[in-house]
Image (cartoon, rainbow, N blue to C red):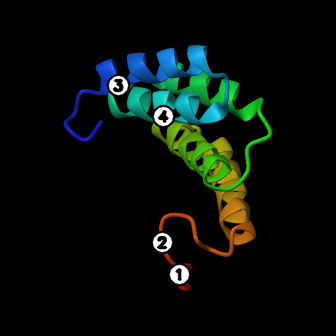
Amino acid sequence: MRRGEFEEARAYFVKAFELQRFPVPLVYAAIASYKINDMKWADYYLREADKYDSKGLTELRIDGYKALIFIKEDNMSEGFRALQEYTASDEHLGGRGYGKKTTY
């Protein structure tokens, strides 16, 4: 996905999920969908991934991208709710999400 081939990457992640059903490929399919501005599929893949008992970074990615999708769709109330879930997930992990815990 680093080279911008998001549609092709999404197809590979969906295929990976079909071969072995666990949430990580769905999360990455959602991220690829988000990158190509396909919020419908990004939301779908996150909802499917959320059906699994995901913990750790997978849960953090699901919560973070949910927030981004809601905000991009101008649904601020749901976006801020999802950001609260993201923050709670990150705190649960000791602030080790994508970087160190930041205090403002």
As measured in the structure, the alpha-carbon distance from the residue carrying label 2 to the one carrying label 1 is 8 Å
Residue 100 percent across, percent down from the top left: 51, 78
Mark 1 or 3, nearer chain start: 3
Residue 9, numbered label: 3
Of label 4 and label 1, which has the lower sequence position?
4
What kind of residue is marked 2? Gly
Q: Earlier in the sequence, mark 2 or mark 4?
A: 4
Residue 102 numbered mark, or none? 1
Q: How dense is the environment of label 1, judged by Cα within 10 Å: few (below 14), some, or many (20 and up)? A: few
Q: Is residue 72 left or right of residue 43?
A: left
Contact between marks 2 and 1 (CB within 8 A): the answer is: yes
Is mark 4 in CB contact (under 8 Å) with mark 3?
Answer: yes
Mark 4 → mark 1, Cα distance in angstroms: 25 Å
**Extreme front residue here?**
19
Residue 15 point in image, percent of width and height? 49, 15
Residue 57 sits in quarter? bottom right
Q: Mark 4 points at which residue?
A: 28
CB atoms of marks 2 and 3 within 8 Å = no
Q: Identify the residue at image location x=39%, y=30%.
A: 32
Mark 1, secondary structure of its residue: loop
Q: Where is residue 67 in the image (x, y as percent from the top left)?
A: 58, 46
Q: Which amino acid does label 3 sit on?
A: Ala
**Residue at horizontal 69 percent and vertical 68 percent from the top:** 93
Packing grade of label 2 (10 A; few <14, some 14-19, many >=20) is: few
